[in-house]
Image (tube, rainbow, N blue to C red):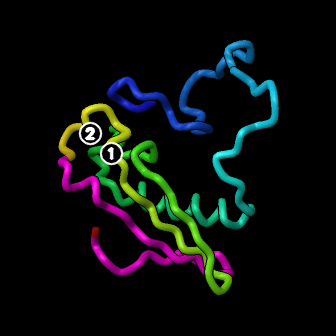
Amino acid sequence: MESQGQEAPPGSGTSAPIPEAAIPWPKQDLTPLATLEGPAVQAAHAALEEAVKRFPKESMGKCAFSARALEVVIGQEAGWYFVRVNRRVDRCPGFGPGVTGIETDWFELYAISPDGELTRYPYQP
């Protein structure tokens, strides 16, 4: 569970099981945020994991340095997936400790080959 009273990310398994009666299961068809092919989801997940690993270890557990403060944009070209991970600290209350407004214009770009190899674009955000 994150500090600052934030909820754990979906599927993280970091908290006690939720009683089934407390889950607001959809009563109709699920409204999708997006529909992606399995390999696109795997590519996005790999890029997101890599971006999170690059955060300072001492900031682990703070909203501004978690997947909650990130969004993923994915595209495909010539059989390659390209994933841009944008930092969105505005999703965290008060932007979190030690984070300035300048840091809100941050992103990382990754290429995932048809064979599944992940490569980070060579620059420092």
Residue placed under numbered mark 2 in the picture: 95
Residue 115 place in picture, x, y as percent: 68, 80
Where residue 89 is drawn, which disc sits there?
A: 1
- Residue in the image at 56% along x and 66% along y: 74
Where residue 60 is drawn, which disc sits there?
A: none
Residue 22 sits above or below residue 15 on the image: above
Judged left or right of residue 7, residue 32 is right
Nearer to us in this view, 111 or 35: 35
> Which residues are drawn in magenta?
100-124
Name the residue type under label 2: Phe
Residue 98 place in picture, x, y as percent: 18, 43
Residue 1 sits above or below residue 44 on the image: above
- Residue in the image at 21% along x and 46% along y: 99
Residue 105 included in the magenta stretch of the image: yes
- Residue in the image at 52% along x and 37% along y: 9
Q: Could you tell me how many numbered marks the image carries?
A: 2
Q: Are marks 2 and 1 in contact (CB under 8 Å)?
A: yes
Name the residue type under label 1: Val
Residue 78 sits above or below residue 69 on the image: below
The quarter of the displayed image where residue 81 is located: bottom right
Judged left or right of residue 109, residue 14 is right
Q: Earlier in the sequence, mark 2 or mark 1?
A: 1
Residue 115 included in the magenta stretch of the image: yes
